[in-house]
Image: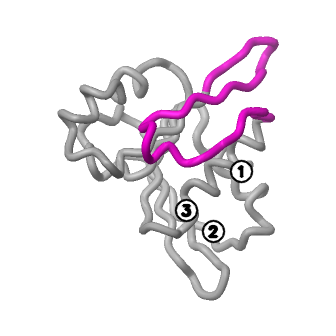
């Protein structure tokens, strides 16, 4: 499945992705630098009412955000594997534990450690599609 969108349509794209993510909680975001992976995570978090500041976890590796659902506080982990070398380093930094925590996880640069992802991870591929437009394709692996 795919969509072509611009920044003004991000809220609708986020809602569409949430529908395809359920019941799984892991979203692997593939795309070159500057294609809008972090911007998309921001839109996904806005859709769930996250009040925390959403930013790139390039240096922290894992950012944690919270939101209310079904009367309970739930977590979203925003993970960036860009600075890591491989699966082993990802596991040492706690990424594996986070992916299997039962919380929502949005992971940028998943190709760094492809073997650590659970079954049924939703893979999102973002590419440039002309001036100010992006193409998003989703695939469950």
Please identify, in this view, whether the residue under mark 2 or under mark 1 is nearer the observer.
Answer: 1
Instruction: Give the percent coordinates (x, y) of residue 48.
Output: 76, 36
- Residue 31: name its quadrant: bottom left
Q: Residues within 10 Å of mark 1 (few under 14, many from 20)?
A: many
Residue tagged by mark 2?
A: 3
- 86 vs 52, left or right, is left
SS assignment at label 3: loop
| Lateral position of residue 27 relative to residue 17, left or right | left
Quarter of the image for residue 87 reads top left
Q: Is residue 13 above or below residue 100?
A: below
Residue neighbourhood size for the residue with mark 3, other residues' Cα within 10 Å, grouped as few (<14), some (14–19), many (≥20)? few
13 horizontally vs 76: left or right: right
Front disc: 3 or 1? 1
Write the residue at 62% across / 48% down: 41
- The quadrant the N terminus occupies is bottom right
**Mark 2 or 1 closer to N-term?**
2
User: Could you tell me which secondary element the residue under label 1 belongs to?
Assistant: helix
**Which stretch is magenta?**
49-75
| Residue 24 spot, x, y in % from top left | 53, 32
Q: Which residue is mark 1?
A: 43
**111 and 17: which is toward the camera:** 111
- Element type where label 2 sits in the image: strand
**Are the two marked residues, 3 and 2, in contact with CB atoms closer than 8 angstroms?**
yes
Residue under label 3? 1
Residues 51 and 121: in front is 51
Residue, x 46% and y 39% (percent of image)? 79
Q: Is residue 67 magenta?
A: yes
Q: Give x and y (percent) for residue 35.
A: 53, 69
């Amino acid at each position: 499945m795919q969509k072509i969108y611009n920044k003004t349509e991000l809220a609708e794209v986020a809602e569409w992705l949430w529908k395809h993510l359920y019941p799984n909680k892991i979203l692997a975001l593939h795309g070159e630098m500057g294609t809008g992976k972090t911007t998309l995570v921001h839109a996904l978090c806005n859709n769930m009412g996250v009040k925390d500041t959403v930013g790139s976890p390039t240096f922290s590796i894992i950012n944690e955000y919270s939101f209310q659902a079904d009367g309970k506080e739930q977590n979203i982990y925003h993970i960036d594997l860009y600075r890591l070398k491989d699966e082993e380093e990802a596991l040492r930094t706690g990424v594996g534990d986070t992916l299997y925590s039962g919380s929502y996880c949005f992971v940028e640069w998943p190709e760094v450690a492809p073997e650590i992802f659970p079954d049924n991870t939703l893979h999102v591929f973002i590419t440039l599609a002309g001036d100010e437009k992006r193409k998003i394709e989703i695939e469950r692996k």
